[in-house]
Image (tube, rainbow, N blue to C red):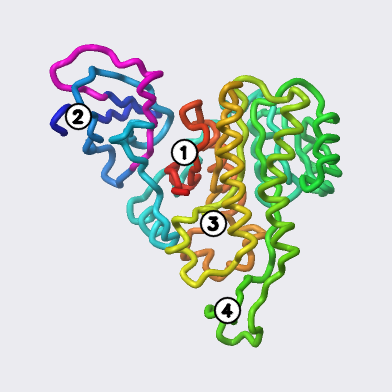
């Protein structure tokens, strides 16, 4: 309860309806003007009434139908009084909290995910020959989507999927290759584009001896050429691919453009996750990708295209193998679970979500 009103959260099956009831007024709020965003919050004990954000003067009553979730908290998006509710930066503590609270979204996303959301949808996935990209293509095919899988070189696993189209020889670091990809794409505009192609250096970069590896004899390790390569693929490459598709008329009003980035791109979270620094190329590339996504969102929103940056969660893939010793304690999941988290989050996105950076583990935003 606040001085001016209160928020009542009602859970009804898979649809949560949030009502903002404001004292001494019956006037309806124009939902387009107020733009409510729904953020998931769950406790093992079930749904609860949460304190409202301060609404200011009494402004009326409003109802908005929220997307699927276990329980919801409402914030006023874009309001001077409202602030985003962010995910936790400490991966180990976050996973422990999810386990303690038996968090449905984080631990059992399969109970929330609806395959029919993608039936008949045209979805393009870059870097679809292995890892998370391959799992996204696999799950999308199971959902009945027309999957366009792009990659530099196909794999036996991708070939076996028999998706709608495989476009190989796609290097997102080369403009001529992304333009050729767009020209080779069969069919009309896409419903979803998932920019997933990436690159990660195997060794951790440090200027001086890595304090986390006292046994190492290396005075430090930096590879500037690979840093540039990482940024080129993981950030600029997403602009190249998206621009090529846009120029070829493959984006339409309502299309969703997704950038698979990482919590590693959050500058604010470096004081928790990177206390000793290092991993320059990887972290810089993800921060650059987030900036690219925000700018694309601002440019493409007038065309009705939704753009969002997603941290897929901590997945047990070839790229994260150098962190395998912390996979268990930090809740790393198999790629097929990570893929489901990503597709579930994409299905929840709408025009109010454009330009935002989400953690697919819990559906909350990550600060820049």
Residue 169: horizontal and vertical position, in percent? 86, 44
- Label 4 vs label 2: CA separation? 51 Å
The kind of secondary structure element at disc 1 is helix
Residue pictured at 64% horizontal, 39% vertical: 139
- Label 2 vs label 3: CA separation? 36 Å
- The answer to which of marks 4 and 2 sits earlier in the sequence is 2
- The answer to which of marks 2 and 3 sits earlier in the sequence is 2
The kind of secondary structure element at disc 4 is loop
Mark 3 and mark 2 in contact (Cβ < 8 Å)? no
Pointer 3: what residue?
264
Q: Nearer the viewer, residue 270 or 325?
A: 270
- The answer to which of marks 1 and 4 sits earlier in the sequence is 1
Task: Tell me which segment is drawn in magenta.
Answer: 20-41
Q: Nearer the viewer, mark 3 or mark 1?
A: 3
The kind of secondary structure element at disc 3 is helix
Pointer 2: what residue?
6
Q: Is 33 on the left-hand or right-hand side of 187?
A: left
In the displayed orientation, state which residue is furthest to the top: 27
Q: Residues within 10 Å of mark 2 (few under 14, many from 20)?
A: many
Residue pictured at 38% horizontal, 22% vertical: 65
Residue 194: horizontal and vertical position, in percent? 65, 38
Q: Is 162 on the left-hand or right-hand side of 330?
A: right
Q: Which circle marks residue 60 in the picture?
A: none
- The answer to which of marks 2 and 1 sits earlier in the sequence is 2
Location of the N terminus (image quadrant): top left
Pointer 1: what residue?
111
């Amino acid at each position: 309860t606040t001085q001016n009103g209160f928020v009542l959260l009602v859970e009804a099956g898979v649809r949560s309806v949030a009502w903002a009831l404001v004292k001494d007024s019956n006037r309806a709020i124009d939902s387009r003007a107020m733009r409510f965003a729904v953020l998931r919050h769950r406790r093992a004990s079930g749904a609860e009434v949460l304190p409202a954000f301060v609404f200011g003067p009494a402004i009326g009553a409003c109802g908005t139908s929220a997307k699927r979730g276990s329980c919801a908290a409402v914030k006023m998006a874009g309001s001077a009084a409202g602030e985003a509710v962010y995910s936790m930066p400490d991966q180990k503590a976050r996973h422990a909290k999810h386990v303690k609270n038996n968090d449905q979204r984080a631990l059992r996303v399969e109970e929330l995910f609806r395959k029919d959301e993608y039936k008949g949808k045209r979805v393009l996935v870059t870097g679809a020959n292995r890892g998370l990209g391959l799992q996204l293509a696999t799950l999308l095919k199971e959902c009945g989507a027309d999957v366009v899988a792009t990659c530099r070189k196909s794999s036996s696993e991708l070939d076996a999927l028999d998706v709608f189209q495989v476009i190989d020889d796609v290097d997102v670091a080369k403009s001529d290759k992304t333009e050729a990809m767009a020209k080779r794409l069969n069919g009309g505009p896409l419903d979803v584009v998932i920019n997933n192609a990436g690159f990660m250096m195997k060794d951790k970069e440090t200027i001086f001896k890595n304090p986390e590896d006292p046994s190492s004899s290396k005075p430090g390790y930096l590879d500037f050429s690979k840093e540039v390569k990482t940024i080129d693929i993981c950030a600029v490459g997403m602009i190249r691919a998206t621009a090529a598709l846009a120029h070829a008329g493959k984006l339409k009003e309502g299309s969703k453009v997704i950038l698979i980035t990482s919590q590693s791109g959050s500058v604010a979270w470096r004081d928790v996750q990177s206390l000793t620094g290092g991993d320059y190329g990887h972290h810089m590339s993800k921060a650059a990708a987030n900036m690219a996504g925000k700018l694309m969102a601002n440019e493409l929103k007038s065309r009705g295209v939704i753009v969002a940056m997603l941290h897929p969660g901590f997945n047990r893939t070839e790229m994260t193998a150098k962190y395998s010793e912390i996979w268990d304690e930090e809740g790393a999941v198999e790629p097929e679970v990570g893929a489901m988290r990503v597709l579930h989050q994409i299905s929840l996105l709408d025009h109010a979500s454009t330009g935002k950076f989400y953690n697919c583990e819990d559906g909350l935003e990550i600060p820049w």
